[in-house]
Amino acid sequence: MAEEKKDPIKEEDITVEPSGAKEEEVPDTQTIETQEDSGGEAASGSDKAGDEQEDTKEYQEENPAETDGEESPEDEDKKGKTEKGSWGFGFGKNKKEDKKDQQIAELNDKVKRQLAEFDNYRKRTEKEKSAMFEIGAKSVLEKLLPIIDNFERGLAAIPETEKENATAVGMDKIYKQLLKALEELEVKPIEAMGQQFSPDFHNAVMQVEVEGVEENTIVEEFQKGYLYRDSVLRYSMVKVNR
């Protein structure tokens, strides 16, 4: 048999593909359609969300009373800052305020005490001035009493026939003028004749027994006593029945 002759293989006809090369993948039409559908759905969803936000905004504008109770993020931030200032970083401020309030309370108490002391001082000073004035007035009035006593003795010694004399009339007028001046100075005589003896107003120098007269009754007055306001200027010198 005759052997068939084979054509020699040329190097140009042999093509060696590199091992690292990958075959190009042909995109599947179904995958492309799915991606397109999902993208359309996402776009439609975003459109719907935008429409819902616009509806919500319009509803809030139309019904503000129903949304007043809700707090916005800005309000929450402000509230958080306020709470942080009062509970977190505000302790130093509260301490300063407490110290300031304590100082104010101490100063108020000090002022009240000073005002009370000044009021007591004022009352005490007025009382002392009044007492000093009363003592000074008493010393002057006591010197006038003997003059009045002499006028009374002189008028009592004038006979009945001479009481119309000009001298007697002048003495009587001066005596009455002195009594009027003493009355304006709140000086008045102490009642003695026929009164019960009182050691607060009378000075008993004699005791007698008189029939028909009650015991401790004043039967005679030797020297008239006087009161200055509510205090005794001079005690009455009297005779008392036993």
Image (tube, grey):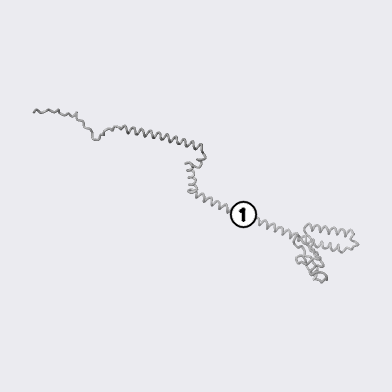
Drawn side of residue 230 relative to residue 155, left or right = left
What amino acid does circle 1 point to? Lys
Q: Quadrant of residue 143?
A: bottom right
Q: Position of residue 59 (x, y in %)?
A: 49, 37
Q: Position of residue 149 (x, y in %)?
A: 82, 63
Q: Quadrant of residue 45?
A: top left
| Image quadrant containing the C terminus | bottom right
Compared with 110, 26 (above or below) is above
Q: Position of residue 2 (x, y in %)?
A: 9, 27
Q: Nearer the viewer, residue 3 or 77?
A: 3
> How many numbered marks, from 0 up?
1
Q: Residue furthest left?
A: 1
Q: Residue furthest right?
A: 161
**Residue drawn at x 62%, y 54% as measured from the top left:** 112
Q: Position of residue 52 (x, y in %)?
A: 45, 36
Q: Nearer the viewer, residue 119 or 27?
A: 27
Drawn side of residue 25 relative to residue 84, left or right = left
The residue that label 1 is drawn on is 112
Q: Secondary structure at mark 1?
A: helix
Neighbour class for label 1 at 10 Å: few (<14), some, many (≥20)?
few
| Image quadrant containing the N terminus | top left
Q: Nearer the viewer, residue 146 or 161?
A: 161
Compared with 62, 217 (above or below) is below
